[in-house]
Amino acid sequence: MEVLLFFTGMIVAFVGTLAGSGGLIGMPMMLLLGIPVHTSIATAKFSNIFSSSSSFVYLLKDRKVTFRECLPIIPLAAAGGMIGSYLSDQINPSVLEWMAFFFLLFALLLSLLKGIKPAGKKEVYTLPVGKLFLISAYDGLFGPGQATLIMYTHLMHGLTYLKTVALTRFQTFVSCLGAFIMYFINGHVDWVTAIPFALGALVGAQLSVRLAAKVSIKQAGKLLNIITFILIIQVGLRLFL
C-alpha cells in the first residue's frame, strides 16, 4: 500500500500544482484503500505542507512572486485552516465521508462547468480577503478542490498564471500547516500513511513547477476530470452498496 500511496501523492501534487484540485484524486483513493476519513484528510494536509512549500520556494527563487505579496495571506490562511479542521473534528466520521462524496462531486462539477481560464491583463490587484479565508476554512475542513478555487479567484482578479500558481501554493502551505496541527493534536495522524504520500507529493510538486511553463493547463484539467470522475463513481458505489 505504501508504494501506491507514494505514486498517488506524486500524481496529486503534479496535477494539483498545475491545475488545482489534485486532492480530488488523492482523497477518493485513500478512502478506497480503507483509510479513515479524518486520517485521509490529515494525510493530505501533511503532504501538502511539503509539496506546496517546495513548489512555492522554487517559484519565489524564480521571481514569479515576492514574499511581500504573500504576507497578507498568512493570517487568513492559518486561521481558516485551523477553524476548518476544528469543525471537521466535531463531525462523525460516517457523516463526514458522505460529505466528502458530495464535496468531491461539487468540486468536479465546478471544474467541468468553469474550467481554468487564462489570466486577464489588469495591473491593479486587491487581495480578496473574504473569499480566500473561506477557501482556507474549507481546506481545513476537507480540502479537495480548494486550490482550483484559489486559482479561479486570483485569475478572475487579473493575476498572471505563474503568479497565481505561486500564491496558491503559498496559501495551501499555510492553511494545511494550521489544519495539520489541529489534526495531529486530535490524534488523526497515521505516519505509515502520511510519510509515503508526502514523499510522493514532494516529487510530484518539483516535477510540476519545472514543467508549468510547458504543460497545457487545459490538458491537465481534462486529465484531472477524467480520473476524478472514475474515482467518484467508485467511492459512490462503496457508499451506496
Image: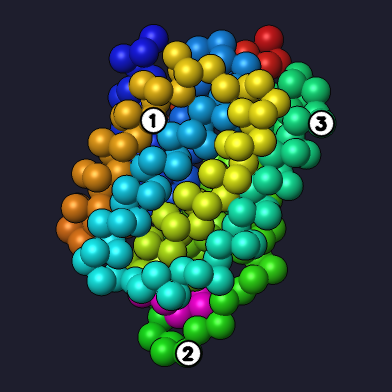
Q: Is residue 157 magenta?
A: yes
Q: Tell me the element at label 3.
A: loop
**Circles 3 and 2 in contact, beta carbons < 8 Å:** no
**Residue drawn 42% across the image and 55% down it:** 169
- The C terminus, quarter of image: top right
**Residue drawn 57% across the image and 50% down it:** 175
Using the rendered view, name the quadrant where residue 129 is placed.
bottom right
Residue on which the image places disc 1 = 198
> The residue under label 1 is which amino acid type?
Ala
> The residue under label 3 is which amino acid type?
Gln
Residue 56, compared with residue 177, is above or below; it is below
Q: CA distance from mark 3 to mark 1?
A: 26 Å
Bounds of the magenta span? 156-160
Determine the main secondary structure of the stretch shown in magenta. Answer: loop
Q: Nearer the viewer, residue 233 or 63?
A: 63
Direction from residue 17 to residue 85 in the image, left or right: right
**Is residue 138 among the parts visible in the rendering?**
no
Q: Earlier in the sequence, mark 3 or mark 1?
A: 3
Q: Nearer the viewer, residue 195 or 150?
A: 195
Marker disc for residue 222 = none
Q: Nearer the viewer, residue 120 or 133?
A: 133
Residue on which the image places disc 3 = 90
User: Can you give x and y, in whole percent of width and height, for residue 184 in the image?
Assistant: 61, 28
Q: CA distance from mark 2 to mark 1?
A: 36 Å
